[in-house]
Image (cartoon, grey):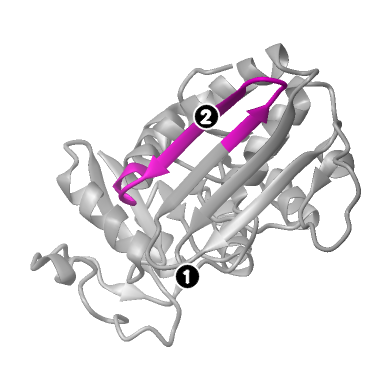
Amino acid sequence: MHKIAVAGASGRMGHMLIEAIRASQDCQLAGALDIASSPAIGNDAAAFLGHASGVPVTADIRAALKNARVLIDFTRPEGTLAHIRHCREMGVNAVIGTTGFSEDQKAQIADSARDIAIVMAPNMSVGVNVTMKLLEMAAKALSTGYDIEIIEAHHRHKVDAPSGTALKMGEVIAQAMGRDLKECAVYAREGVTGERDPSTIGFASIRGGDIVGDHTVLFAGTGERIEITHKSASRATYSQGSLRAVRFLADKRKGLFDMFDVLNLR
């Protein structure tokens, strides 16, 4: 059995992960972690399902990790980094779905991967990562003569923009075309902007309601446009992808991986 600890256990994603683990034939909930102010602290982690898992929700990181082989973390950058430090000390692998990391924070995670195995991806959905592969193929074929815009929409509670998934899409496209996203990304347009620079990749973010996650990449050429879209109807797709990442890490001791590695999309 894959023994898993879940960070943010009382949140929306935490609940989805716990439900997926319970429904799985080869995974077991071994720890449940949340912030000290969570009203779920001390309660059974699966109580929301009307089920007793025997795993209490705790704010003690080491207690949550002591019986686990892998931590799944979809929290906030600062919290994830604290969790990863303990994972490194205790030899616990990690699956990171948290977004909004700075370059320095990403470097800290990469450093931790010298001692433990980590799968980190801005989107754990299998479908999204297959979409990334399609975008790589499209970018190579449409590298000239097409303007590229990335449009993403998420629920009103999302705190970072553009989404980590949108940024990853931009990185995949830029790399396929031999560009650096840091130099060609345009994140906002207002007022008299002048004509569009054909070498840029534009981003637009929409926030509202309970949108789980929609992403569209537009390749606009002369006389035609191509749109590659992925829409998430449920967070269940993220939890299922996370469990695939857990299984991938079963025989890994160290190293930094992403969902392309998990899905053999290299």
Q: Which mark is residue 228?
A: 2
SS at mark 1 in the image: loop
* Quarter location, residue 240: top left
| Label 2 with label 1: CB-CB less than 8 Å | no
Q: Alpha carbon of mark 2 to alpha carbon of mark 1: how far?
A: 24 Å
**Is residue 93 at least partly visible in the picture?**
no
Q: Which mark is residue 156?
A: 1
**Is residue 23 at least partly visible in the picture?**
yes
Q: Amino acid at mark 2?
A: Ile
- Work out which quarter of the rendered image holds the C terminus and state it: top right
Q: Which mark is residue 49?
A: none
Left or right of 75, for residue 39: left
Q: Please state which of residues 94 and 198 is positioned toward the viewer in this rendering.
A: 198
Q: Please state which of residues 193 and 98 is positioned toward the viewer in this rendering.
A: 193
Q: Name the mark nearer the viewer: 2 or 1.
A: 2
Residue found at x 58% / y 42%: 116
Say whether disc 2 or disc 1 marks the residue closer to the N-terminus: 1
Q: Amino acid at mark 1?
A: Arg
Residue 14 coordinates in the image, percent (x, y): 34, 62
**Residue 73 in magenta?**
no
SS at mark 2 in the image: strand
Residue 72 coordinates in the image, percent (x, y): 43, 52
Q: Is residue 210 above or below residue 182?
A: below
Residue found at x 31% / y 86%: 39
* Quarter location, residue 41: bottom left
Residue that sits furthest to the front in the current view: 223
The span shown in magenta is: 217-237
Left or right of 165, for residue 194: right
